Image (cartoon, rainbow, N blue to C red):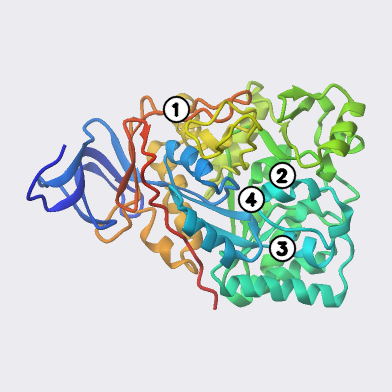
Amino acid sequence: MSRSGASHDLAIVGGRVVDPETGLDAERNVGIVGGRIASVTADAITARHTVEAHGLVVAPGWIDLHSHAQTVAGGRLHARDGVTTALDLEGGLLDVAGHYARAGEEGRPINYGYSTSWQQARMLHVGALPTGELVDILGHFGDPAWKRTASDRQLDRIEEHLRRDLADGAIGIGLLVGYAPGVDPAEYVRMSAVAADTGTATFTHARDLVEHVPHAVIDGAEELVRAAESTGAHSHYCHINSTSLWDIDRVHDLIERSPARVTTEAYPYGAAATSISADFLAPNRLHEHRLTPASIVYSPTGERIADAARLDHLRATDPGAVAIIHYLDEHEPRDQEVLRRALGFPGTVIGSDAMPLSWPAAVADPQAWPPPDLTVHPRGAGTFSRYLRRYVRELGTVSLVDAIHQCTLGPAQILEPFVPAMRTKGRIRTGADADLVVFDPDTVTDHATYDAGTRASTGYAAVVVGGELLVENDVLRLDVLPGRPVRAVAQ
């Protein structure tokens, strides 16, 4: 609806407005001017364009701290899932200034940002391997070259590179230490000290727990927590569900007893996804996580791997392929309870761990919309809507208001001490960024599956990014790319 002489650029009227910061949960009208919220009021307002939200919920847009899907197409899938900001903080990128510049030139549908990558710095300075986007380096995850013991000079170069990226706005340090389980724990402490010194944070894919790998160099949870304690760094525990599995209670207890600042995230799926060349997917290691070759799906073809010989063959011939790993069976009550506890731990936020899209050669334009049905992990298209459907509506294990907090204000507060942009996200108040979702809590749902991981979620009357209407009535606008960069300010 358009109106002349309007006082706002965009108005969302008659909706149930939920602001997790102030506790507001009431019918209000929200007026937007120039990318910011200009009014939240019970009074009538006018605008050039109006979204009718009667019977719907109006909330801050979902904030995803853990997404490797940083392309235009990946951002569009996120937007259909209600995400207005998606950051790659677990893996990160190297030379972030260049990545920010390229993303700005291309445009992005939602807000974006990156940590600096310890793994890629190691690949470059220890392994003499190429760096780039995640899709470019997946084939090197199992390469022993970057996992060798680093010399003092190599460690200095890694630190120098990370500090340069932090000065250029990188949002902390991404530490995929779980893929290099033999690295000296002192190196992890050193990188945590860099985060502490720069006033940022670490975002860690932790090493294995000793319950899974008794001969591990160090217990992954102990390492993360103790490094935070000894350095004073803020440590974020990425996808705690997939690295802790059946031992989640012991990890939670460790975090609760620690005086350090350790934050956590989880996603609402029993399966994970990663490079098929990862060390822990070697056939002789599958038992450590109660896996068999049949627990693994080879994404390029959707094939369930038949046996160890086939797994060895794929790891050797296509090491960069994405594998979907079925850890927890969500239809089995004990496994479902593990996932529920991971998601319900106090302070835990929702993060998708969305994988980059691997387009088939037959698709001429990888930016085309809609994407084909790809065999990729569904979390890149459905994480937040699945959480609302499954845990709020079906299981009733979390209230709608608390779920909104986990998807919005919680992630913003994790970053806001050193990321100024996050202080005006995750809220609905005058002056906050106009990153908003309008959805039907009774129908919002995911449609992505393990066989068709790019099917978009539905139930969103509107997704607004920076004041721009990006999704309306579950229809994505392809003519706008309103996403803006999110950067840290290191000390």
Q: Which label number is shown at residue 87?
A: none
Q: Residue at x 37, y 29 (%)?
A: 459
Question: First in sequence: mark 4 or mark 3?
Answer: 3
Using the rendered view, name the quadrant where residue 95 is placed: bottom right
Identify the secondary structure beneath mark 3. Answer: helix
Q: Is residue 474 left or right of residue 387?
A: left
Q: Which label number is shown at residue 243?
A: 2
Identify the secondary structure beneath mark 2. Answer: helix
> What's the residue type where badge 1 is placed?
Thr
Q: Are marks 2 and 4 in contact (CB under 8 Å)?
A: yes
Label 2 – label 1 distance at C-alpha? 26 Å
Crowdedness of circle 3 by 10 Å Cα count: few (<14), some, many (20+)?
many
Q: Are marks 3 and 2 in contact (CB under 8 Å)?
A: no
Q: Residue at x 61, y 28 (%)?
A: 374
Identify the secondary structure beneath mark 4. Answer: loop
Q: Which residue is mark 4?
A: 238
Q: Which label number is shown at residue 118?
A: 3
Q: Is residue 151 left or right of residue 441?
A: right
Q: Quarter holding the N terminus? A: top left
Is residue 149 visible in this depiction of the protein?
A: yes
> What's the residue type where badge 2 is placed?
Thr
> What's the residue type where badge 3 is placed?
Trp
Question: First in sequence: mark 4 or mark 1?
Answer: 4
Q: Quarter holding the C terminus? A: bottom right
Crowdedness of circle 1 by 10 Å Cα count: few (<14), some, many (20+)?
many
Q: Nearer the viewer, mark 3 or mark 2?
A: 3
Label 3 – label 1 distance at C-alpha? 36 Å
Q: Is residue 478 left or right of residue 306?
A: left
Q: Are marks 3 and 1 in contact (CB under 8 Å)?
A: no
